[in-house]
Image: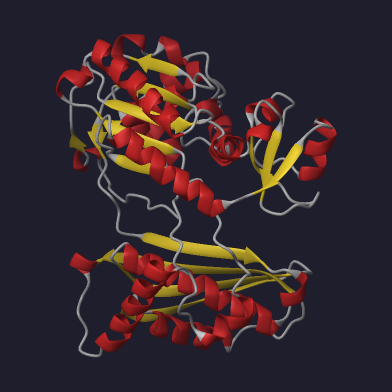
Amino acid sequence: MSSSPQADSIEQDQPIQPANSYNWLFIDLNSYFASVEQQIQPLLRKKPVAVCAVMADSSACIAASYEAKAFGIKTGTRIGDAKRMCPGLILVKAQHEMYVDYHQKITEAIERCHPITSVHSIDEVALRLSGRDRNEENALALAHDIKKSIYSVGSELGCSIGISTNRFLSKLASDMQKPNGLILLSQRDLPHKLLHLKLRDIPGIGSKMEERLHRHNIRDMHQLLALDVHSMREIWGGIWGERMHKWLRGNDFDVENGKNKSFSHEHVLPPNLRNPDGAFAIAQKLLLKGAVRLRQHHLWASRLYVGLRYIDQYKWSQEIKMLECQDSLTLLEALQLIWKDVPRRSAPLKVNIALLNLIDDKERTFSLFENTKRLRLSQAVDSLNMRYGRNTVYFGGVHNIKAAAPTRIAFSSIPDFTV
């Protein structure tokens, strides 16, 4: 889960460059999961392909090739519906570790052309331009070099690139021409090149935000761009409205990271684990995944959230406050305390674990009661699993469900394969 800055004024955001140059280049890998499958399986090329986590009609597509998208299939389409929409559809079970492996190869290929500023997700990368690269001709040449470098990893690995005055608009530009697009949005292109877009085309405007805009009688880009900064603050509920107002006008500035971060993992239980013991085992595994992420990102958690949903749609959740920690044993003890209050109902369906109030190493308060041996033990387990492979060393509580709750890839993160 991503963090949400809590600033009260745009003045806390630091200006980087004036808005009269190309400051950012954004790379969006086209139909990434499906493209990787077409790369490693030549027989899938030029054919409608849907990638799914579970090969069942009740499941959903997590990616579709452009040949499948031509039939209206997209991420989230139910498999049963996708088959009806495209009778020749080829279903492929997701190979998450393969996608991470290709992600690493692709980022290395990009780095051969220009340093990466930030990795937004497994299929999105942003580059801050400087010096001569901010010139239009040089920015275009860099984009073509990056495309060639990515194609050197695999002939099926296309990307769309957006270049603009700020990161927000460069991401928006990367969505404007797919597949294999290349769009520049300069200051002189604003706002007329945005007027044909739909509200949902704008990064950060999802279904709920669109509904809120509709309640304020904002139904198209003409109306959105006509709003003043105070109106946008009111609609967005704070600083993000002001930022959106400035980004849409080409201004470039850095956003300070907020401190209220969190990590979460959830898993729908398979039928054989829809019982209290199975749910607890899965909860332990999800928590251990989160603990590894804490240590890898040098973060510490002070609250643990546990949520359960049952077959009959009953929902239960609870949080517990802890001393700032990142070791597995302390977190498992917190989970056990929460689990004592779990309702004794039959057939739990989904388990959700979240680590809350995350803070960085530099910001944490050291405790006299801290058990450093526990952290060293957890770090040693991480090192062994990183060197010799997942599940080389693991806690006994997850022995019977090692194959359950496999690592899934969210589009907003690159997972760590150590648990």
Residue furthest to the left in view is 131
Q: Within the image, what quadrant is residue 407 found in?
A: bottom right
Residue under the point 38% across and 78% down: 381
Please state the horizontal and vertical placement of residue 75, each as a whole percent of the image: 64, 39
For residue 45, side relative to residue 289 (left or right): right
Q: What is the number of callouts on the image?
A: 0
The image shows residue 159, relative to residue 314, as above or below, that is above
The image shows residue 99, relative to residue 356, as above or below, that is above
- Whether residue 409 can be seen here: no
Please state the horizontal and vertical placement of residue 176, each as a whole percent of the image: 49, 20
Residue furthest to the front in view is 42
> Which of these two is toward me, 346 or 390?
390
Residue under the point 67% across and 84% down: 277
> Which of these two is toward me, 196 or 36?
36
Q: Within the image, what quadrant is residue 316 found in?
A: bottom right
Residue under the point 69% across and 39% down: 50
For residue 313, side relative to residue 113 (left or right): right
> Which of these two is toward me, 82 or 256?
82
Please state the horizontal and vertical placement of residue 102, each as a whole percent of the image: 46, 43
- Whether residue 133 can be seen here: yes
Colouring chosen for the image of the structure = secondary structure
Q: Quadrant of the N terminus?
A: bottom left
Residue under the point 32% across and 15% down: 140
For residue 37, side relative to residue 152 (left or right): right
